Amino acid sequence: MRKLKVLRTIAGLSQWDLTAKTGIPAYKISLFETGRIEPKSDELKILSNALGVTPKVLSDEEIILKGSEQ
């Protein structure tokens, strides 16, 4: 879930900051960002709320974030 790292970085948050906002352990955030595991639906909602986006924006890799196109 590469987009999680992009959105977290745009928000100016470290993994520890996101942990503080969500209660999701930093090691799991790292695993999400590297694609080793996918967040459960409740975790996806918590993360998207913390980052100010919808769960669809966070989870759908087809939605391109303005400024992050490659």
Image: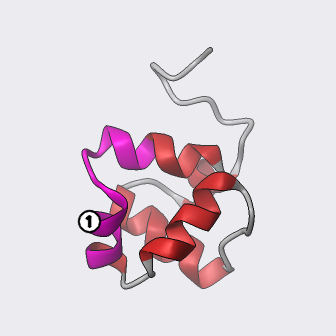
Question: Would you place residue 68 above or below residue 16 in this image?
Answer: above
Q: Which residue is mark 1?
A: 17
Q: Quadrant of the C terminus?
A: top right
Question: Would you place residue 43 above or below residue 56 in this image?
Answer: below
* Tally of marks: 1
- The stretch of residues the image draws in magenta is 7-20
Please report the residue visible at 72 percent of the width from the left and 56 percent of the height from the top.
35
Q: Position of residue 50 (x, y in %)?
A: 35, 66
Determine the main secondary structure of the stretch shown in magenta.
Answer: helix
Q: For the residue labelled by badge 1, is the local secondary structure a helix, a strand or a loop?
A: helix
Question: Would you place residue 13 above or below residue 48 in this image?
Answer: above
Please report the residue visible at 47 percent of the width from the left and 63 percent of the height from the top.
48
Q: Position of residue 9 (x, y in %)?
A: 36, 42
Q: Nearer the viewer, residue 10 or 36?
A: 36
Please report the residue visible at 59 percent of the width from the left and 55 percent of the height from the top.
33
Which residue extends farthest front? 27
Q: Nearer the viewer, residue 57 or 1?
A: 1
Amino acid tagged 1: Asp
Q: Dividing the picture into quarters, in which one does residue 12 lie? A: top left
Coloration mode: secondary structure
Q: Can residue 43 be found in the magenta stretch?
A: no
Q: Position of residue 49 (x, y in %)?
A: 39, 67
Q: Position of residue 6 (x, y in %)?
A: 47, 40
